[in-house]
Image (cartoon, helix red, strand yellow):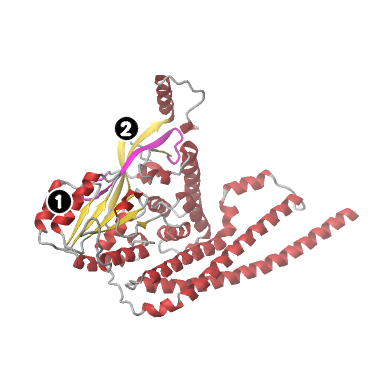
């Protein structure tokens, strides 16, 4: 009896202490949430005002860019704090784990679980405090910059920048755009091996926004007024007739801007043609912009190379949240917001995947549908592909030489979608496929044989369309092909193909 009473009183004391600690911790976190919201509002006002100005000072651009990154980190910490309570409610893994070791209310194991959850809260408190301190420091650092912002003229907003939907506006490349504009409009000509041309190399992985950045720059009225002609050479081609037309039409020494998008490697012969073009039909002040996935083009630059990277995870989550929920406030659907955060982690910064997945999620605002998409993207797409080839699908598609992919289809276990190649085109250049990647992965469409799918059509200039060459492959067929290839090569291997494991 005494042992039972001591256990009861001990449990009551433990629960009382836990109640007061949790109540104090909850009040403290609510105060931190309010403070972080206020500081984020101040940071957003400064960033929005800076983005509306034509800033030419590179130091000021870097300061604003650092403040923008800190703002995205703050929004990510705030959302993590808000939606952490729904982790166990929305995750089937936690439910299975809880049911598998159901113990009594007085068990020591449950106390260990409570202590681990409190440690998780402590780490989240530290994350919020770090984001709050970082934002406050950045706002103090740019206090003088805010005073100088009014000295810069306001930007002329073009029609496609007036849309309220974020997918219709360039996101996360404001500083890079201003740097390219400064190179084109304000950087004086320098002597180089091209004699008349200054060259800006832009390097970055596939689908990171190089073409979109250049299109926005070239659509700027200041750039169009500064150069007599803007010539585009895409997909690594510069034909003799193209150069002849430019040479004949602009033989009177006018300023020329050449945008050259390299696909693969830039050959010496092609570069020599551009050198000939620079000396035959352009005057001092003409410039070249070269974009490529390869770092080899950095040797051709006469100025510092601009390197584009995928968006940081915090900025990518901000973008994915906005295009997924649209005008709907995520705080009205906290469970869906938590699921969206988990889904964004599996996409690894892919803008194409973000737009496809957001469209699928917006089709059905239900917990069951979003849980199904999370389970599919996390297990059938990412984990399966990494176990097969040791890399994320986004990494395979954005390499200098993209490699084939095997993707599982939603609800299908007997066949995979084999993506053999991909390429980009403009909607006006060729007829687009009627089947979309969304239909094949998430819908009931099952084409036969080899076919092409439209992965995504960008609503931004230059309106690129991403097309994949695909094939539905049965698992048994792949096993037979694998065994035949091994037999023909004289290799004997025990076991099954790793692609179906």
Q: Which residue is mark 1?
A: 243
269 relative position to 40: left or right: left
Q: Is residue 430 above or below residue 77?
A: above
> Magenta stretch?
408-432
- Rate crowding at label 1 as few (under 14), some (14 to 19) or many (20 or more) other CA atoms within 10 Å: some
Note whether residue 346 is visible: yes
297 relative position to 128: left or right: left
Per the model, the C-alpha gap separating discs 1 and 2 is 41 Å
* Between marks 1 and 2 in the image, the one whose residue lies nearer the viewer: 1
Residue 309 position, x and y percent, is 40, 55
Residue 9 in the magenta stretch? The answer is no
Residue 99 position, x and y percent, is 66, 45
Q: Are marks 1 and 2 in contact (CB under 8 Å)?
A: no
- Rate crowding at label 2 as few (under 14), some (14 to 19) or many (20 or more) other CA atoms within 10 Å: few
Q: Nearer the viewer, residue 286 or 279?
A: 279
Q: Residue at x 51, y 73 (%)?
A: 39
Residue 415 in the magenta stretch? The answer is yes
Residue 315 position, x and y percent, is 45, 60
Under circle 2, the secondary element is loop
Q: Is residue 279 above or below residue 25?
A: above
Under circle 1, the secondary element is helix
How many labels were placed on the picture?
A: 2
178 relative position to 111: left or right: left
Give the farthest residue toward the right. 2
From the image, which quarter does the N terminus lie in? bottom right
Q: Which residue is mark 2?
A: 449
């Amino acid at each position: 009896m005494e042992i039972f009473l001591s256990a009861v009183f001990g449990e009551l004391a433990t629960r009382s202490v836990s109640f007061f600690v949790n109540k104090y911790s909850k009040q403290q976190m609510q105060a931190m949430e309010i403070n972080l919201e206020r500081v984020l509002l101040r940071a957003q006002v400064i960033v929005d005002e800076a983005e509306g100005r034509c800033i030419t000072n590179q130091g000021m651009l870097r300061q604003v860019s650092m403040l923008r990154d800190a703002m995205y980190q703050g929004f990510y910490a705030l959302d993590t704090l808000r939606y952490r309570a729904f982790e166990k409610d929305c995750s089937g893994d936690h439910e299975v784990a809880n049911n598998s070791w159901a113990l009594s209310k007085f068990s020591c194991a449950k106390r260990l679980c409570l202590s681990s959850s409190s440690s998780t809260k402590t780490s989240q408190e530290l994350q919020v405090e770090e984001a709050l301190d970082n934002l406050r420091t950045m706002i103090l650092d740019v206090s003088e910059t805010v005073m100088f912002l009014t000295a810069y003229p306001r930007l002329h907003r073009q029609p496609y920048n007036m849309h309220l939907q974020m997918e219709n506006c360039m996101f996360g490349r404001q500083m890079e755009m201003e740097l390219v504009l400064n190179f084109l409009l304000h950087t004086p000509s320098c002597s180089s091996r091209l004699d008349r041309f200054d060259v800006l190399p832009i390097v970055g992985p596939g689908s990171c926004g190089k073409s979109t950045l250049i299109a926005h720059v070239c659509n700027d009225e200041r750039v169009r007024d500064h150069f007599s002609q803007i010539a585009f050479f895409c997909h690594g081609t510069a034909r003799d007739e193209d150069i002849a037309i430019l040479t004949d039409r602009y033989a009177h020494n006018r300023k020329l801007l050449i945008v050259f998008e390299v696909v693969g490697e830039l050959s010496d012969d092609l570069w020599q043609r551009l050198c000939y073009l620079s000396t035959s039909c352009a005057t001092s002040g003409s410039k070249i912009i070269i974009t490529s996935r390869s770092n080899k083009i950095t040797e051709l630059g006469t100025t510092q190379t601009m390197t584009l990277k995928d968006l940081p995870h915090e900025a990518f989550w901000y973008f994915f949240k906005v295009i997924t929920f649209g005008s709907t406030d995520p705080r009205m659907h906290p469970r869906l917001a938590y699921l969206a955060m988990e889904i964004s982690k599996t996409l690894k910064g892919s803008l194409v995947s973000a737009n496809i997945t957001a469209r699928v999620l917006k089709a059905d605002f239900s917990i069951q549908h979003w849980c199904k998409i999370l389970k599919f993207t996390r297990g059938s797409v990412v984990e399966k592909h990494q176990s097969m080839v040791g890399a994320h699908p986004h990494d395979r598609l954005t390499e200098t030489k993209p490699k084939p992919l095997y993707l599982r289809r939603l609800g299908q276990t007997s066949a995979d979608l084999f993506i053999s190649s991909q390429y980009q085109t403009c909607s006006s250049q060729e007829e687009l496929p009627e089947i979309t990647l969304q239909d094949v992965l998430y819908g009931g469409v099952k084409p036969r044989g080899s076919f092409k799918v439209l992965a995504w059509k960008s609503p931004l200039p230059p309106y690129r369309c991403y097309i994949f060459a695909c094939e539905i492959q049965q698992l048994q067929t792949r096993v037979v092909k694998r065994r035949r290839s091994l037999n023909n090569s004289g290799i004997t291997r025990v076991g099954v193909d790793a692609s179906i494991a």
